[in-house]
């Protein structure tokens, strides 16, 4: 692996506009499980489709109950080594954008400004009205549910309030998808980190990058379906790999 780390460091040093693409693997060391893995949340509970959420108050209550079960278990997570190294790369001018499949808000918590983070699957740290877009905090939503035994509705337009995440069957956000495409086509290095690259259309971005002649690096514990396309594949724990990269890029600067 040492040779692979050396090659990755060289790629980062020579890049002018790197884009980072992150999946669940960057957050597992922070105590946030990969819900799609064997034994994960989605193997125990059938996902609630977006249309079902819209159609029934009872279904919305169940969705909120499940969400708070997850949120209460992971809401105290803090950025891990991978998040911190990526933030350091951003502030060093090497990374232009972070495209993420995660909803845990840990890239922002690590110090990356919101305008550089593209959240393809939304953000689980707050809620919003599906009609007018008004933002609501999760504590407010919980209090409304506990007081009324009904799912929350918007105070401005009476629309349905939902976590600001993309549910199964819900359309991907047009703005974020367009922003991710633009960043990908502008990249000369695309780092796919901690993603199985199985969930589309998000997993199409590494393919776009490679088709536009960017160098593609995949770091993941398990093989992915795009490994054959990559210029470099490193199988390993993401935090370990990025910590080794940081040790070479910034000797003596401890990132933990």
Image: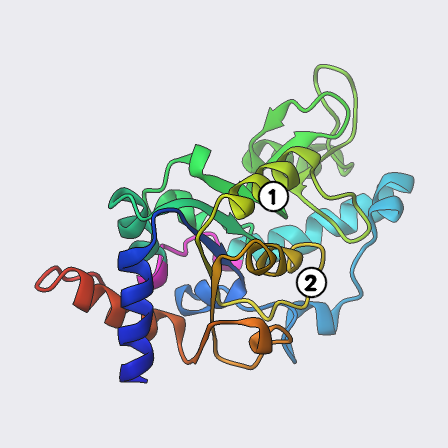
Question: Looking at the rendering, which quadrant does residue 225 occupy?
Answer: bottom right
What residue sits 49% from the left and 57% below the top? 214
Against 148, residue 251 (above or below) is: below
* Residue at the (90%, 42%) spot, across then down: 56
Residues in magenta?
73-82
Q: Residue furthest front?
A: 213
Q: State yes or no: residue 60 in magenta.
A: no
Pick out the residue farthest to the top. Answer: 156
Q: Quadrant of residue 20?
A: bottom left
- Residue 181, which numbered label? 1
Observer-nearest of 133 and 82: 82
Q: Distance between the residues labelled 2 and 1?
A: 16 Å
| Front position in the image: 33 or 185 | 185
Which residue position holds label 2?
A: 199
At horizontal 36% and vertical 56% (from top left) the residue drawn is 83
Up/down of 214 relative to 41, above or below = above
What secondary structure is found at the residue carrying circle 2?
A: loop
Find residue 153 and name its label: none
């Amino acid at each position: 692996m040492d040779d692979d780390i050396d090659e990755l460091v060289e790629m980062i040093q020579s890049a002018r506009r790197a884009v980072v693409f992150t999946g669940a693997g960057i957050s597992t060391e922070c105590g946030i499980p990969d819900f799609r893995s064997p034994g994960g949340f989605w193997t125990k509970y059938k996902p609630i489709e977006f249309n079902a959420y819209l159609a029934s108050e009872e279904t919305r209550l169940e969705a909120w109950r499940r969400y708070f079960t997850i949120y209460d278990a992971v809401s105290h997570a803090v950025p891990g080594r991978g998040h911190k190294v990526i933030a350091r790369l951003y502030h060093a001018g090497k990374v232009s954008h972070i495209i993420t499949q995660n909803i845990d808000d840990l890239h922002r918590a690590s110090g990356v400004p919101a305008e550089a983070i593209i959240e393809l699957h939304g953000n689980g740290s707050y809620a919003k009205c599906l009609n007018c877009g008004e933002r609501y905090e999760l504590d407010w939503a919980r209090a409304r549910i506990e007081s009324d035994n009904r799912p929350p509705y918007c105070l401005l337009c009476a629309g349905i309030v939902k976590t600001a995440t993309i549910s199964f069957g819900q359309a991907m956000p047009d703005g974020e998808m367009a922003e991710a495409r633009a960043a990908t086509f502008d990249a000369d290095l695309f780092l796919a980190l901690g993603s199985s690259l199985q969930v589309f259309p998000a997993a199409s971005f590494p393919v776009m990058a490679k088709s536009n002649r960017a160098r593609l690096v995949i770091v993941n514990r398990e093989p992915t379906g795009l490994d054959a396309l990559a210029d470099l594949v490193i199988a390993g724990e993401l935090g370990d790999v990025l910590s080794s990269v940081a040790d070479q890029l910034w000797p003596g600067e401890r990132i933990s």
